[in-house]
Amino acid sequence: MMNWLKENWFYLTVLVIALAIPHMITNLYYAQIITMSCIFAIGALSMNLIMGYTGQMSLAHGGFFAIGAYSMGILTSTLGWNFWLALPASALLAAFIGFWVGLPALRTRGAYFAITTLCLGEIIYLLAGNWMELTGGHTGMVGIPLPSPVAIPGVGQITFNSPASQYYLVLSFLLLTLFVMYRLINSMRGRTFLATAINEDLAEAVGINIFRTKLLSFVVANFFAGLAGGIYASLMGSISPSVASVTMTFNFLMYVLLGGMTTLAGPVIGAFIIPILLEYLQFLQDYQMILFGFLLIVVIIYFPTGFMGLFNKLRDRVQNSKVGGRRAS
């Protein structure tokens, strides 16, 4: 038990802090930023699955996030569905579309796949902005209801009107996403993902069905992207075509790269640090993106493994110095 606590002290500390955040942050504006960061962390984790663990650069991630968001808006505000039915339906729709898109798209590799998905994301963006009858066009959708109350025996009815309740709701989905991702990447199927990312030809030579592996990863990633989009739409109450823009995709990409690709903690860290950092750089106005772009270049060149890679290197150095000190004594 003690060994397990020593090995996982960092993650346990982060969990305790995450649970205490509503009691630590009383400013409603910053509380909303933290809640949005949890949603973006779900989207970043899903992009990390297809890009980091499977080696496929999908540039339509913002589009699938938007599919989940618009599906949630249509199902709840237009058709009157319950949030708890509309959310899985929205995620499944994103996964379903991802499956049929992946059938032809994943037969391409490298830059060709990236260009294909970039074009797909642009198509979704154009549909969101011009399909007036379904999406509301460039005006977007408004009046999307908050998550439906939940009745728990012995506890009573839990509503999601307050910032704290909304935060804990999103945190629950983030922890669920982390759990699913952890089980998936540490399974035999997850090993095939990594083998595909490292060397597709070699993986195929040892009997791995490359196409099926990439398709599964693409579908699962789009499911969680749609899940994040559905939660986002419900909590925001309104959405516009900007959720499908290439900017949203590159935001997810930035979270993954700066946080640390091929790790579970990295995308989450990136999704929290970057939005908060941008808020503190607002006084720079138009110059903040110049500074942030420079920071991004520096991190990618000198710290290609991101914040988590840097943390792991420092941790290994400390452990090695302790081992060296014991041997010397």
Image (cartoon, rainbow, N blue to C red):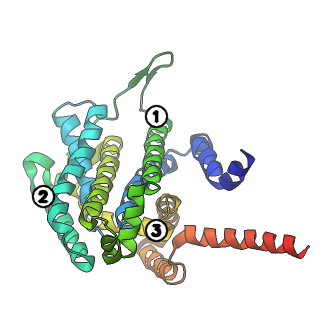
92 left or right of 312 in image: left
Quadrant of residue 83 within the rendered picture: top left
Instruction: Please state the horizontal and vertical placement of residue 290, each as a whole percent of the image.
Output: 43, 79
Circle 1 SS class: loop
**Circle 1: residue type:** Ser
Give the residue pinned by disc 3. 261
Question: Foreground mark, 3 or 1?
Answer: 3
**Circle 2: residue type:** Leu
Q: Earlier in the sequence, mark 3 or mark 1?
A: 1
Between residues 289 and 183, which one lies in front from this camera angle?
Answer: 183
Q: Give the alpha-carbon distance from disc 2 to disc 1, as whole Å.
A: 33 Å
Question: Quick one: label 3, few (<14), some, or many (20+) residues within 10 Å?
Answer: many
Per the rendering, the mark at residue 127 is: 2
* Residue 247 visible to an observer of this rendering: yes
Question: Quick one: label 2, few (<14), some, or many (20+) residues within 10 Å?
Answer: some
Instruction: Please state the horizontal and vertical placement of residue 315, each as a whole percent of the image.
Output: 68, 68
Circle 2 SS class: helix
The single residue placed furthest to the right in the displayed view is: 329
Q: Which residue: 25% across, 64% down?
A: 60
Give the residue pinned by disc 1. 162
Quadrant of residue 289 within the rendered picture: bottom left
